[in-house]
Each structure stands twice: as structure tokens, then as C-alpha cells.
Image (spheres, helix red, strand yellow):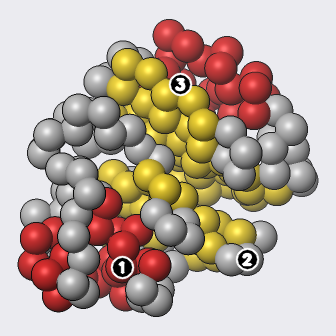
Amino acid sequence: MCGIFGFIGSKPNLSLLKEIGELASTRGVHGWGIASESHFESGDGKLEQKIDILDSFKDESWLIGHCRLATFGNYEGVVQPLRSKRHIFAHNGNVYNYPYLANYIHYTMKTDCDSEIIGALLDVGYSLRKVSQLLNQPYAILATTKKGMSAIRKGLPLFVSEREEGTYFCSRAFDRSEPLKEGREYSYK
């Protein structure tokens, strides 16, 4: 499965950000992407090999990262985090019922990436908790909201650590982190 990581707060501690980026990279070896409000970087292979790219995010108040392990669908040219009309999000897991969900909300998929449907559901007004209930699969998701960032998981790991400068997330456990409780949506500003 893929690795996701993120931060929301004032300015990230770069050494901790690189640590969680490297940890997430162990879960995804086929490609990576990092998005913030004003910046997007992506590449092939493990993020661990390009970890210093995180230096360019040192002044960001939030970011979401994704390290891909190819397990489902054709992702040529598609890198997470994904941008929908109103959200930026990263998803760990598979959405096997994405054709049904797209049909249900009358949405035409623009890529072969099953995770795209998550953004479409958020854009039409579903909460992240409701989206997660529709997935019927194990998942971990980080998504931007109007007020900040939300996180939710079920069956796949996602750890959180609140620090003085902000809140960090990662698919792997890290120093002073705790797992999010399953099925509960957490919101951060």
C-alpha cells in the first residue's frame, strides 16, 4: 500500500518533515508527490532518494505528500496528491467501487485513478467521513478543507503527532505519534 504524510501549522520542522517523508517512502516505491497551497513537486521512484525537495516547502503552513505503491489501475501521468475543484487530498487504499460511485453522482472520471472519485464526492458536498463510509475498503485519507485539513482511516495506518509548530501525519509510526482511531474524522487548523 502507499504511504501518505502531511503537516498543518505555522512552519514545519524540516528534520521531522524529512523523517516522516522517508518513513512514508518505505510504503511507496513507484512515485511520489507533494502539494501545498502554492507548490507541487513530483517524481518517479522513492521520495527517500529526493528527500531534500522538502526544503522547498519550509515556509508552507500545510502540505500533503503521497508515496505510491502501484497496486490498482493505470496511473500513467497521474500523481497524488490529487487536486479536485475544491480540495487537495492523498489516499492510501483502493476504491474498487469507483465506477458505481461516479455513476451515482453523475461524475465523469477524468483519469484512470480510482482515488479521483474521493475528490469528486468531496466537491459535491460529502464530508470526508461520509466519503469514507462509501468506500467499502480499507483506507487512509488526508484532505484539505475550507478550515484546514482533515484525516481519517480504517484498516490502514495513519499516525498523528501534535507539536508546538503544528500537526504531523504519516502512514508509519514516528516519534511521539499515535494512531488515529478508526472511522473517526479528525479536523486540524
Q: Which circle marks residue 121 in the picture?
A: 1
Up the image or down, 7 lies above or below 123; here it is above
**Residue that carries the numbered disc 2 in the rendered image:** 147
Residue lying at 32% horizontally and 23% vertically, measured from the top left: 29
**Residue that carries the numbered disc 3 in the rendered image:** 22
Q: Is residue 74 left or right of residue 53?
A: left
Up the image or down, 187 lies above or below 142; here it is below
Measured Cα–Cα span from mark 1 to mark 2: 18 Å
- Foreground disc of the pair 3, 1: 1
- Foreground disc of the pair 2, 3: 2
Amino acid at dot 2: Lys
Residue 122: % across, % down: 44, 78
User: Which quadrant of the rendered structure holds the C terminus?
Assistant: bottom right
Residue 44: % across, % down: 37, 19
Tag 3 near tag 1, CB within 8 Å: no
Whether residue 32 can be seen here:
yes
Residue lying at 38% horizontally and 38% vertically, measured from the top left: 79
Q: Label 3 crowding class (10 Å Cα cut-off): few <14, some 14-19, many 20+? A: many
Tag 1 near tag 2, CB within 8 Å: no
User: SS class of the residue under badge 2?
Assistant: loop
Residue lying at 67% horizontally and 15% vertically, measured from the top left: 52
Q: Return the residue nearer the eye: 169 or 73.
A: 73
Mark 2 or mark 1, which is nearer the start of the sequence? 1
Measured Cα–Cα span from mark 2 to mark 3: 28 Å
Whether residue 128 can be seen here:
no
User: SS class of the residue under badge 1?
Assistant: helix
Residue lying at 36% horizontally and 73% vertically, measured from the top left: 120
